[in-house]
């Protein structure tokens, strides 16, 4: 173990971001949200059209922390055992052996998670909540750190199985990503076409900045960041305000308040602070709270969105001055 201080941890995290940027160009907000989610020991749901580099980002992040990553394309015929693993008969020895599924990794990519039926989606949630997988009556722990990055396509809904609200609530954040600016796209094209075979950037040149064990130490350090009672009260008031919006069928539950503080602590560590501040809550309220809200038909007719509702709440709920 390194015995990180706040300052050395922030420096290590900045080095990780720099290493990721060698393969994944731009989208700084998404990179920060992924690192905050990973530091907080949570999982992230990413919505965006195909081809924006979500898989590349996870592979680059895994490489930078010295870990592994695996990707599974979710399809209607995907079975739970295709994710978690199973017990099979070894014909050579006549014994039953355990075959671990791809979820036994550090960073797991559930690509287009809404294309698999509910039973297959649900097979991930023990892993996400308990950081273990159970089959054949035995619970097997997942490596640490462990994070699920699940993706959704915002446009192609035919043949999909939308995530129930209770399952969306399991994700610490939901990140919305769009097409990159022209300059970033130009740089990406130049790198890909500079004598490299293939259609995307490679992570082969990336080096591990720290080990998975060291990153787990950073997670513990983030969990210990100080939380001012006034900032906790602010997070709770923001979350509670979602429960009295007339055009919402359902507001955010207590997990929303907890998630705000968990993410705020990770953001504080990322910025080299020993304590959280109201700006941490403000910066994270949209990705942390919006996906936990259920908009009514009336709200949709009025042209409202979950994001606009959170923005309105942010402008109306007074932040502490400390």
Image (cartoon, rainbow, N blue to C red):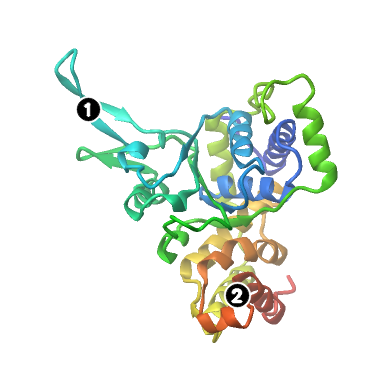
- What is the x, y in percent for residue 117? 36, 52
Residue sticking out furthest to the right: 183
Residue tagged 1: 88
Residue sticking out furthest to the front: 158
- What is the x, y in percent for residue 215? 57, 36
Secondary structure of residue under mark 1: strand
Asked if residue 1 is positioned above or below residue 148 in the image, the reply reads above
Which quarter of the picture shows residue 194? top right
Which quarter of the picture shows residue 265? bottom right
Secondary structure of residue under mark 2: helix
Give whichever of discs 1 and 2 has the lower sequence position.
Answer: 1
Asked if residue 315 is positioned above or below residue 133 in the image, the reply reads below
- Quadrant where the N terminus sits is top right
User: Residue at point 72% right, 78% down?
Assistant: 315
> Which is nearer the eye, 274 or 207?
207
- What is the x, y in percent for residue 308? 66, 74
User: Residue at point 47% right, 65% down?
Assistant: 255
In the visual, does 89 lie left or right of 247?
left
Disc 1: CA contacts within 10 A as few (<14), some (14-19) or many (>=20): few
Q: Are marks 1 and 2 in contact (CB under 8 Å)?
A: no
- What is the x, y in percent for residue 168? 47, 60
Disc 2: CA contacts within 10 A as few (<14), some (14-19) or many (>=20): many
User: Residue at point 70% right, 74% down?
Assistant: 320
State the mark number for residue 302: none
Which of discs 1 and 2 lies nearer the camera? The answer is 1
> Which is nearer the eye, 283 or 44?
44
> Which is nearer the eye, 245 or 227?
245
> Which is nearer the eye, 88 or 223?
88
Residue tagged 2: 238
In the visual, does 97 lie left or right of 296?
left
State how far apart marks 1 and 2 are (Cα): 49 Å
């Amino acid at each position: 173990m390194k015995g990180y201080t706040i300052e050395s941890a922030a420096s290590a995290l900045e080095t990780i971001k720099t290493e990721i940027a060698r393969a994944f160009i731009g989208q700084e907000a998404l990179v920060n949200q992924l690192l905050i989610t990973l530091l907080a020991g949570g999982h992230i749901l990413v919505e965006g059209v195909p081809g924006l580099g979500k898989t590349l980002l996870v592979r680059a992040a895994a490489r930078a922390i010295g870990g592994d990553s695996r990707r599974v394309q979710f399809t209607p015929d995907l079975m739970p055992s295709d994710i978690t693993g199973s017990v099979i008969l070894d014909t050579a020895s006549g014994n039953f052996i355990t075959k671990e599924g791809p979820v036994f990794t550090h960073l797991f990519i559930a690509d287009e998670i809404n294309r698999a039926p509910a039973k297959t989606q649900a097979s991930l949630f023990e892993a996400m909540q308990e950081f273990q997988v159970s089959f054949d009556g035995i619970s097997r722990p997942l490596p640490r750190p462990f994070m699920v990055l699940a993706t959704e396509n915002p446009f192609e809904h035919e043949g999909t199985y939308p995530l129930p609200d209770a399952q969306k609530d399991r994700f610490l954040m939901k990140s919305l990503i769009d097409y990159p600016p022209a300059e970033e796209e130009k740089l990406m094209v130049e790198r890909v076409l500079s004598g490299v075979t293939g259609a995307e950037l490679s992570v082969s040149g990336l080096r591990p900045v720290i080990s998975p064990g060291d990153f787990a130490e950073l997670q513990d350090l983030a969990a210990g960041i100080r939380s001012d009672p006034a900032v906790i009260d602010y997070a709770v008031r923001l979350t509670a305000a979602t429960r009295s919006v007339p055009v919402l069928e359902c507001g955010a539950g207590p997990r929303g308040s907890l998630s705000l503080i968990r993410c705020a602590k990770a953001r504080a560590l990322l910025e080299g602070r020993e304590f959280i501040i109201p700006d941490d809550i403000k910066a994270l309220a949209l990705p942390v709270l919006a996906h936990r809200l259920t908009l009514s038909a009336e709200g949709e007719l009025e042209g409202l969105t979950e994001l606009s509702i959170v923005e309105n709440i942010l402008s109306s709920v007074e932040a502490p001055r400390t």
